[in-house]
Amino acid sequence: MPEARARGRWVLGLAVAATLLVAAGWTVAIADLRGQDRGAAPPPPPQPVGRTVRSQLLDPRSKSTAYLDDAALSFLRPLRGESGKLRAAFRLPGSDLADEADPRMRALFEQETTGAVVPSAGQVPGEAGVYKIAVEIDKARRAIDDLRLITLKPFAEKKGEKIGLYYLGRWPFESGGTPRSRSYANPTGFIEVTRENKDTHVSEHFKLGDFLTKDQFDVWPKYLVLEPRLVDKLELVIQELQKRGQNVKRVHVMSGFRTPRYNKSGGNTGGRANLSRHMYGDGADIFVDNDRNGNMDDLNRDGRVDATDARVIADAAERVEARYPALVGGIGIYRACCGHGPFTHIDTRGYRARWSGSSGG
């Protein structure tokens, strides 16, 4: 009989312990729910699959693939120019990203405005825009963080004198006639510049917006012709100035691309040539403006700002052409006049041209 009582007490003890454990569990669960009701943060939702895939495609730290070294990406070096400072490649839709690329290469383009990813065997996407680039070879992958692909609107999309609401005008030989050289043929295409992408770097020191025509201020998107050779030459000029002790931090583009319409009738037209290189995207009027006062800096340190400072830039451009004959073109020195300070014109027209004063360009 005592043994039966002992077994009963033991069973009763187990039952009580089990009851207490269940009650404790319910207490914790209820406390958690009350905590959420009082504003405690809920667990984060799962990350969308599309976002995860995109970050892996373009994040060089991704552990899902091996990492491509610089030697494997040597075919991209020409896109950076002789200066090594170019940060954008301009291409027509359907063209190749780079010449002589590894046949195993697979490119991935992410449009910056929409985040859409376009896989490709190396051909440029068909939609105009600015794209981030990643490259895959076999199972190795790498994001090209310091280079953007900018696809062009083909010249054929220009209807009459404009694209969309933006007026361009007509190029000198658009309606007939034979240009004196290929450098005066119609542009192949246009960069579509929006409020969102105008600050995209095309090189270390220059952005898309630096080269826009100064008209139609409220019309977006705008359209721009810009030759990488010009940007490359400008970066090389900066390098030459720095070699000679100039601490160049900012170069102001006083005039970059000019639409034919603006070149003919916009603003002060004095000194504008009918075949101005500005219309072809390979000419720019520039001055060094580190202090951002809107005027040329005193580059020769003589206490004055005049055409001799513009000559310092011109001399640097001369040295660039001597070293890189493929970038030969025009160099013009302009003195202060008509509301602007001195500046230097530089272009890559393909043959040597020199002038000073108020003519040329």
Image (tube, rainbow, N blue to C red):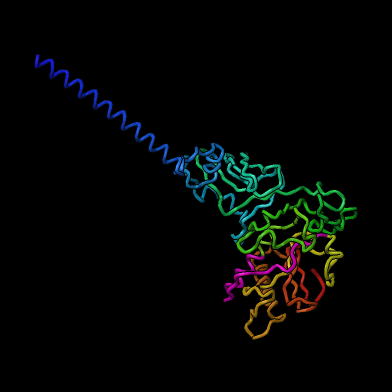
Residue 247 is one of the magenta-drawn residues: yes
As drawn, the residue found furthest toward the right would be 176
Location of residue 193 (image quadrant):
bottom right
Q: Quadrant of residue 58?
A: top right
- Decide if residue 351 is on the left or right side of residue 244: right
The x, y position of residue 88, in whole percent, is 64, 54
Which quarter of the rendered picture does the C terminus lie within? bottom right
- In depth, the one of 85 and 211 nearer the eye is 211
Does the magenta portion include 277?
A: no
Answer whether residue 63 is visible to the viewer in this image: no
Taking 30 as reference, is 146 above or below it?
A: below
Residue beneath the point at 72% across and 49% down: 152
97 vs 352, left or right, is left
Establish if 264 lies above or below 58: below
Asked if 101 appears above or below 336 in the picture, the reply is above
Kindly identify the residue that appears in the image at 71 percent across and 81 percent down: 306
Residue 249 visible to an observer of this rendering: yes
Span highlighted in magenta in the image = 234-259
* Residue 4 position within the rendered picture, expressed as x and y whole percent measured from the top left: 13, 15
Whole-percent x, y for residue 136 in the image: 55, 41
At x 52%, y 42%, the residue is: 56
